[in-house]
Image: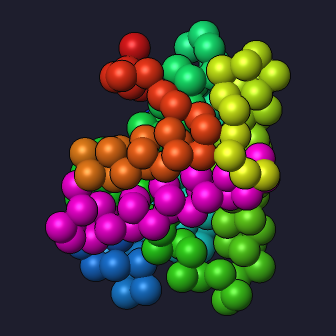
């Protein structure tokens, strides 16, 4: 049996292979063989670490959720002031570009909603984390006087989530909407909703 550290590395490599294979074949057409070929191993080797393809996809889904949920929340916490935090949350919630395999897979998982109870639960959990992050930032911004919202806080938070999801989908689809377009449009909405942002966001700072 592989050592714990080695096993963790191998499982991570399998998830990376699954992301790459899903980007090439699409989630609906993805097979265990596709993942094995991408990883350069046999199906049997994959099954040593995972029970089946669904188990691989669940872990891949969790990895995507961590990036948009816990990892983004931690990044936001590194900034002071609600305006800086909101700018960071917006930028970190979008794909890096059309080739962002992890974010592409997250959007594809939405297609499984209604077909897999486990993925239904994960999709709803992620939405709750997205909404909760925006609600917290807006609530603190209002309390500090940084924001003077022009509508109900819950509706504005909901719209931020909807905008990042909609624009993100267009970005990974490789259409005419770029990351810069999405950032500009969402920042404009922030200003219109009474939560103006700093002149320049710095999500990686």
Say if 46 sits above or below 5 in the image: below
- Residue 31 picture quarter: bottom left
Residue drawn at (36%, 22%) of the image: 199
Q: Is residue 114 above or below residue 25?
A: below
Q: Is residue 1 left or right of residue 201?
A: right
Q: Position of residue 34 (x, y in %)?
A: 31, 75
Task: Judge whether 203 appears above or below 156 on screen.
Answer: above
Number of numbered discs overlaid on the protein picture: 0
Nearer to us in this view, 191 or 203: 191
In the picture, residue 148 is in which quadrant?
Answer: top right
Q: In the image, residue 95 lies at what x, y percent? A: 36, 50
Q: Residue at x 62, y 14 (%)?
A: 81
Which residue is pictured at 67% across the width and 89% down the height?
Answer: 115
In the image: residue 96, left or right of residue 104: left
Boundaries of the magenta span? 153-178
Residue 70, by quadrant, is top right
């Amino acid at each position: 049996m592989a050592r714990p550290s080695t096993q963790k590395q191998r499982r991570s490599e399998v998830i990376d292979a699954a992301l790459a294979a899903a980007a090439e074949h699409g989630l609906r057409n993805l097979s265990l063989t596709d993942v094995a070929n991408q990883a350069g191993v046999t199906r049997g080797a994959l099954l040593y670490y995972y029970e089946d393809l669904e188990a691989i996809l669940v872990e891949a889904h969790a990895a995507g959720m961590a990036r948009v949920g816990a990892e983004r929340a931690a990044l936001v916490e590194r900034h002071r002031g609600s305006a800086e935090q909101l700018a960071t949350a917006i930028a970190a919630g979008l794909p890096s570009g059309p080739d962002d395999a992890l974010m592409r897979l997250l959007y594809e998982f939405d297609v499984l909603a209604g077909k897999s109870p486990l993925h239904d639960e994960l999709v709803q959990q992620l939405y709750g984390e997205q909404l909760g992050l925006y609600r917290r930032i807006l609530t603190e911004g209002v309390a500090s006087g940084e924001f003077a919202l022009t509508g109900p806080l819950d509706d504005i938070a909901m719209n931020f989530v909807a905008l990042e999801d909609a624009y993100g989908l267009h970005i990974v689809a490789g259409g005419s909407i770029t990351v810069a377009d999405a950032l500009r449009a969402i920042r404009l909405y922030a200003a219109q909703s009474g939560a103006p942002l700093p002149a320049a966001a710095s999500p990686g700072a």
